[in-house]
Image (cartoon, rainbow, N blue to C red):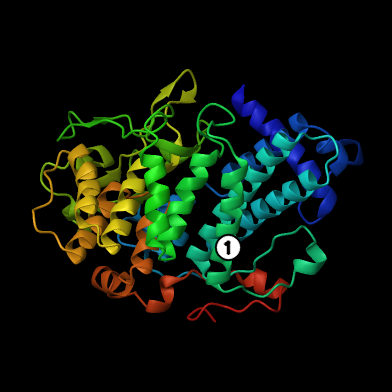
Amino acid sequence: MKNLIYRIAFLLMLTVVSTSCKKILEVKPEFIRTTEQVYANDKSADSVVVGMYAQWASNSNLFDIPVAGGLSSDELKPGASLDDDFLNRYNNRLDPVNSSTKIYWSDYYSVIYTANSIIEGVATSKGMTTSGKQKATGEALFMRAFCYFYLVNFFGDVPLVTSTAYKETKNFPRTPVAKVYAQILEDLLKAESYLGDQYPTAGRVRANKWVVKALLSRVYLYTGDWKNASLKASEIIENRTQYSLGVMEGTSADDAEMDIFHSDNKESIFQMWNEIGYGLAGQTLGDGAYVAVADEGSNSLIDAFEDGDKRRWNYINEETGGYRIYKYRLDVENSEYKEYTVVFRLAEQYLIRAEALAKLGQLDAAVQDVNTIRNRAGLENLDDGQTESSILDAVEQERRVELCFEWSDRWFNLRRLGHLDQVMSENKPTYWKSTAALYPVPRVEIQNNPKLTQNPGYN
């Protein structure tokens, strides 16, 4: 029933968007609703907001985005299917014409357009309550910020579009990353002030104030604002009523068990609902037809797990012929997944705060956060006498093993920390070039917008 509601909301959202931009979708006149009708009251507006999430979940390819950075970095390799696009990502030889990365660009801008439409529609509504307007606007601002975060981390400078005036924005040039981040922060701070503590619906699949804080802490970290990164992460960590670390057990393939990715787990801050046949749980297990961690033998990620680390057996499954992703178990009951695709979770907040505290010189507190994550995985505390440098190394190590295969975290952070060239040159010496740090701007977008320029290395 829940999935049916999402589909209906998605269709309603499309009818609204189509009235503003014919390029999005052609809809028969009898199905078209005007902006005034759709935003006539809180309930109808909320249906469009739900549709925005459904559009994101269906368009941005749940499997592809988290795995993309894994293939580009040193986490994953193409599986038995030997798909050319997967091979090109693994070899860091993306094509501006044929690469599926063009889908990331178009799909995220499609969601941004919908978010802009909601923000504008709510602003002119005469029938919505003040609280209804704030909630709808807050969720749209969050989704717009989320999409821009991934766009700048995949492509670098991107056009910054904050309205539905297609004729005015269709030829926007690329905006510097710093200005895009400034808009992301502006959107998130507004969303934080508009949204409440509770989730609008069950399942933690829509944004509340705490979801916004989770992205805020990450953006502050990426922009070097250590104080605010620490503060926002602390607010979430200290909200023990809503959030706590999940349970992990087992030190072998026979007894590995965890609840971290269960849809009702309190470690999840924000997640996507799954549908049978879709999502990470349905596409990254089994025989490794899509992606694998490694063939028989060893690789740098397998070697990164310390002896006794419970994550080794809970996150990676050793099968005949190699190693497979085991984080997202296919656990089906009554035709629904027990596990959703987790987007933000509490463990990341501990690591964000640890890095920020180390940068601020609060070394003991930073070590405590790192140890919290290590202890949950069955590992001992860090040695005494840690320095800022050694703590930052420990945080990077914990990020690698704790957040592997999650939303391109490894790929983004290697570039953020300035370690990408060194790591990739060691792992892929035949193919790696420093210009591969950013994905190519899709050729079709440059053809449609002459003011767009290509990233170096792809002309």
- Quarter-of-image position of residue 428: bottom left
Q: Residues within 10 Å of mark 1 (few under 14, many from 20)?
A: some
Vertical comparison of 266 with 368: above or below: above
Tell me the residue that label 1 is attached to.
102
From the viewer's side, name the closer residue of 396 and 224.
Answer: 224
Residue drawn at x 56%, y 39% is 207
- Quarter-of-image position of residue 424: bottom left
Residue 225 in view, yes or no = yes
Residue drawn at x 81%, y 48% is 18
Vertical comparison of 435 with 141: above or below: below
Measuring from the top left, give residue 46's x and y in whole percent.
71, 34
Residue 98 in view, yes or no = no
Q: Which residue lies furthest to the left in this view?
A: 384
Q: Considering the image in quadrants, where does the N terminus appear? A: top right
Measuring from the top left, give residue 273's x and y in whole percent.
52, 34
Q: Which residue lies furthest to the top in this view?
A: 334
Residue drawn at x 62%, y 42% is 194
Seen in the image, is 122 located left or right of residue 364? right
Seen in the image, is 167 located left or right of residue 217? right
Measuring from the top left, give residue 240's x and y in whole percent.
36, 32
Vertical comparison of 250 with 95: above or below: above
From the viewer's side, name the closer residue of 329 and 341.
Answer: 341
Q: Is mark 1 on a helix, strand or loop?
A: helix
Q: Considering the image in quadrants, where does the C terminus appear? A: bottom right
Q: Which amino acid type is marked by label 1?
A: Lys
Measuring from the top left, give residue 128's x and y in whole percent.
79, 35
Seen in the image, is 294 located left or right of residue 454? left
